[in-house]
């Protein structure tokens, strides 16, 4: 996990990364197939509501890309709720490529479909 803090040392953003891919990821035609150990998955990228549109998401994406490159990963993958337009714009602005849309089983929480994206390193 990587966090961004403000001047008062309050966490204002964080990203959680690992190699674990949701089961639904296995049924997707990614741009290229890699072993789990060769990819990083963004599981959570969060910005405190008071700091939206302040560049914190961009800092978290830049950290993730740098971290993946330093660790010789070949791909960064993620899923994002289909109606989370600000996040989708952030990923697309940073050259993440759309792969597919899936039902990841969160419909009971009102989250029916997720868009999958990949950044090839």
Image (cartoon, rainbow, N blue to C red):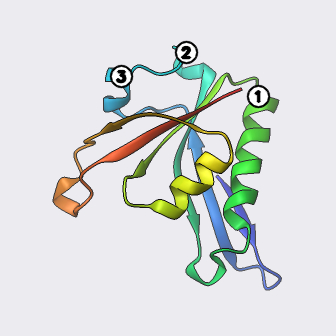
Q: Secondary structure at mark 3?
A: helix
Q: Earlier in the sequence, mark 3 or mark 2?
A: 3
Instruction: Give the residue at x 47% y 33%.
Output: 20
Question: Dot 1: few (<14), some (14–19), or many (≥20) neighbours within 10 Å?
Answer: few
Q: Quadrant of residue 34?
A: top right
Return the x and y of residue 83 as percentages of the image width and height.
37, 60
Return the x and y of residue 103 as percentages of the image width and height.
25, 42
Q: Is residue 39 above or below residue 104?
A: above
Circle 1 is placed at which residue position? 71
Return the x and y of residue 101 as percentages of the image width and height.
34, 38
Q: Earlier in the sequence, mark 2 or mark 1?
A: 2
User: Which of the two discs, 3 and 1, sits closer to the camera?
Assistant: 3
Q: Is residue 67 above or below residue 34?
A: below
**Which quadrant: the C terminus?**
top right
Alpha carbon distance from label 2 to label 1: 15 Å
Task: Compare residues 84 and 22 and report the one nearer the observer.
Answer: 84
Q: Relative to residue 40, is residue 109 drawn left or right?
A: left
Return the x and y of residue 43 as percentages of the image width and height.
50, 47
Instruction: Give the residue at x 61% y 84%.
Output: 50
Circles 2, 1 touching at the beta carbon (< 8 Å): no
Circle 2 is placed at which residue position? 34
Instruction: Give the residue at x 59% y 21%.
Output: 37
Q: Quadrant of residue 109?
A: bottom left
User: Which of the two discs, 2 and 1, sits closer to the camera?
Assistant: 2
Residue at far left of view = 108
Question: Dot 3: few (<14), some (14–19), or many (≥20) neighbours within 10 Å?
Answer: few
**Residue 26 disc label:** 3
Question: Dot 2: few (<14), some (14–19), or many (≥20) neighbours within 10 Å?
Answer: few
Alpha carbon distance from label 3 to label 1: 23 Å
Task: Compare residues 96 and 15 and report the one nearer the observer.
Answer: 96
Instruction: Give the residue at x 38% y 29%.
Output: 25
Q: Is residue 16 above or below residue 117?
A: below
């Amino acid at each position: 996990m990587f966090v961004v803090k403000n001047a008062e040392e309050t966490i204002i953003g964080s990203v959680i990364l690992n190699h674990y891919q949701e089961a639904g990821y296995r049924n997707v035609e990614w741009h290229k197939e890699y072993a789990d150990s060769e990819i990083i998955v963004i599981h959570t990228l969060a910005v405190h509501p008071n700091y939206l549109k302040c560049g914190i998401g961009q800092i978290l994406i830049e950290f993730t890309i740098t971290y993946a490159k330093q660790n010789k990963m070949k791909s960064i993958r993620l899923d994002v709720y289909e109606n989370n337009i600000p996040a989708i714009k952030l990923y697309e602005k940073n050259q993440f490529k759309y792969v597919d849309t899936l039902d990841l089983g969160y419909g009971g929480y009102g989250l029916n479909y997720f868009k999958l994206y990949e950044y090839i390193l």
